[in-house]
Image (tube, grey):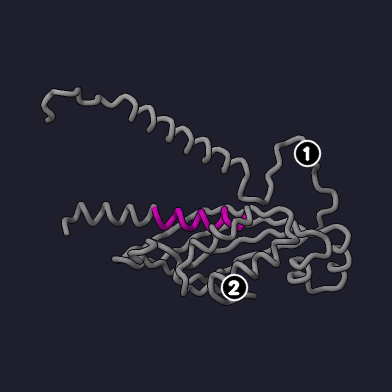
Amino acid sequence: MDPGDEAVRALVARAEIEQVVLKYCRGVDRQDWNLVRSCYHADAVDNHGSFIGGPDSLVEWMQSRHASIDVCVHFVGNVLIDVHGDEAAVESYYMAYQELAPGGVAVKALTRDRETLEESATTGLQLRMLGRYVDWFERRDEVGWRIAHRQVVIESGHLESLIGQQDWNLFQRGDRTPNDHYKALQQRLRTARGVRQQLGASHEVQPQSGLPHA
């Protein structure tokens, strides 16, 4: 293979892999579980610490926990991607922030001491996490690049009460559904593309009857 072609392939692979990492984060934050599932190969294994299993079981576990998480935001920073053929080792640094509803499944799963558990029953908790996604990616012809194995690494985590938090109602609030503001922009973009394609088709020069065709 020409070195130039190989370099282009590697760049394309890195871009596609990073998109998968970002789609996973969006899927979790917006509770778009089909999007989360699409980031993994069907036989993949995810090790989240308190959960180890395949994509379907992962989604089921997440749905249960996130039913009592009112706010969830992931931010991905440094992404290191080492590609070799159809395989890649990927390390993505992340920050995650969550607001856990009072007395919910997520609070009970994360709270160990009785005092914090009793306080969170009425106030809820905020969770801040710093860590890394350490992923083994594989490119398979039928689906492209997806996660084959994920190890979630926690560098630091902090829980505290939601008492005294700022009222953010003056701002446009996000909601935890797939149909949020970004989805509306995507739909607008698809509509604009469709209109341009229709206009392009309508302006094509049609061959006149009786004239030779090239």
Residue 18 painted magenta: yes
Residue at image point 48% right, 66% down: 40
Residue 57 badge? 2
Which is more toward the observer, 24 or 75?
24
Which is more toward the observer, 87 or 188?
188
> At which x and y percent is residue 33?
59, 60
Q: Secondary structure at mark 1?
A: loop
What's the magenta region?
A: 16-29
The mark that comes first in sequence, 2 or 1, is 2
Q: Secondary structure at mark 2?
A: helix
Residue 83: quarter of image? bottom left
> At which x and y percent is residue 148?
44, 70
Residue 169 badge? 1
Q: Quadrant of the C terminus?
A: top left
Residue 185 is left or right of residue 66, and the answer is left
Secondary structure mostly seen in magenta is helix
Which is more toward the observer, 81 or 9?
9
Q: For marks 2 and 1, give the one nearer the viewer.
A: 2
> At which x and y percent is residue 64?
70, 67
